[in-house]
Image (spheres, helix red, strand yellow):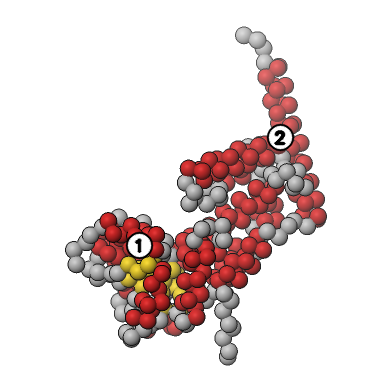
Amino acid sequence: MTKKPLKSWKTLASESKARRKTPLTPEQVEKLNKIFGEIDKEQEQIKEDSNRKIARQPEV
Amino acid sequence: MGKVIPFSEIESYLASIEKNDAPMGTILDTNVLISANYDVRDSHTQITEILDTLQRKHYRVFATVNTRSEYLEFQRRLILTESLLDMVDEFSTVKLPKNARAKIQTLKGSLKTSRAADPEKDEIFNESQLKKIKKEFSAGPHSGQKNWLDICDTFLKGKVAFEDQSLVDRGVEYISPNDESQKHLFDASLGWPEAIKICERTGTAFSDSMILNALKSSKLLFVVTFDFDIGYAALSDPNMKDVVVPDRLFKEYRHYHFPA
């Protein structure tokens, strides 16, 4: 069995960087935006509920 | 006592040890692997030249399993940091939740501040910062963190495995006396008690003690490191072997004198 030649360390560093820097596909962006939009809505809702609760508390 | 050899003398050092019958191999520490892979570090070019020299001369390169774990941990934090910072970039099309965006922006500022204080520090989120960011991807205390799982799926999936494989592609082997192809490299057992002794003797970090212990138990003659403490431990131990370090670090050992 012939041994696969080793790649140079510089080549591998460039490959690694290229892989990390791969831009998101439009589908990935759309998916994330949908999820993030829902988080924003939920967080807003929690904030509103909490404000309402405070407003309902009788004054001391 | 081990010797400390500067990078600039690696060629003559290798020529001098090739006369011995020792196996041609060395152990690398975590920072060596990280710098070789991360071109943002000033030491990147320097270390890739050293490693290419070793490769050209057919030296086997080893790492401890602990080093593998530390390397992959760095990659995890690097990939997450770059992905999160890309999302707060002004040109990003990703619309982050308000709280998460604010938290990432704040912690991005902390990264810049600590980098300004210490230029050798990597601009990478630490574990505590990542945990704070992770919390912001959950609406409330009861809504779980499924959204964080989606982030991991988008940004991390396959990438940590790629980094792990890239070490194999570079020829990095994990040192183990139980591996058949490595049995001949050892002339003593590799165990915890010796590593603990090294740690207690010089106060070296335990991961470094494990590297030194592997070196001591094997027939290999040297390790390559960026860590001052590894060279310090080698110089202070009459039975230790050699340590190859950057020239800048080599100069620092001049201030230390150990009995021969």
Outermost residue, top direction? A60
Provide residue B84's location: percent of width, then percent of height.
65, 48
SS for dot 2? helix
Provide residue B103's location: percent of width, then percent of height.
62, 38
Q: Residue at x 68, y 59 (%)?
A: A21
Provide residue A12's location: percent of width, then percent of height.
60, 70
Left/right placement of residue B111 relative to residue B22 reads right
Residue A46 lies, with reference to residue B43, above or below; the image says above
Q: Residue at x 30, y 59 (%)?
A: B253
Task: Quadrant for the C terminus of chain A, please.
Answer: top right
In the depicted view, which residue is nearer to us: B255 or B235?
B255
Q: Residues within 10 Å of mark 1 (few under 14, many from 20)?
A: some
Outermost residue, left direction? B259
Question: Does residue B69 appear in the picture of this structure?
Answer: no
Provide residue B52's location: percent of width, then percent of height.
51, 75
Picture quadrant of residue B19? bottom left
Q: Residue at x 44, y 73 (%)?
A: B62
Label ID, residue A43: 2
Q: Amino acid at mark 2?
A: Gln
Per the model, the C-alpha gap separating discs 1 and 2 is: 55 Å
Left/right placement of residue B126 relative to residue B249 reads right
Residue B119 lies, with reference to residue B170, above or below; the image says above
**Which subunit holds the residue at mark 2?**
A
The residue that disc 1 covers is B250
SS for dot 1? helix
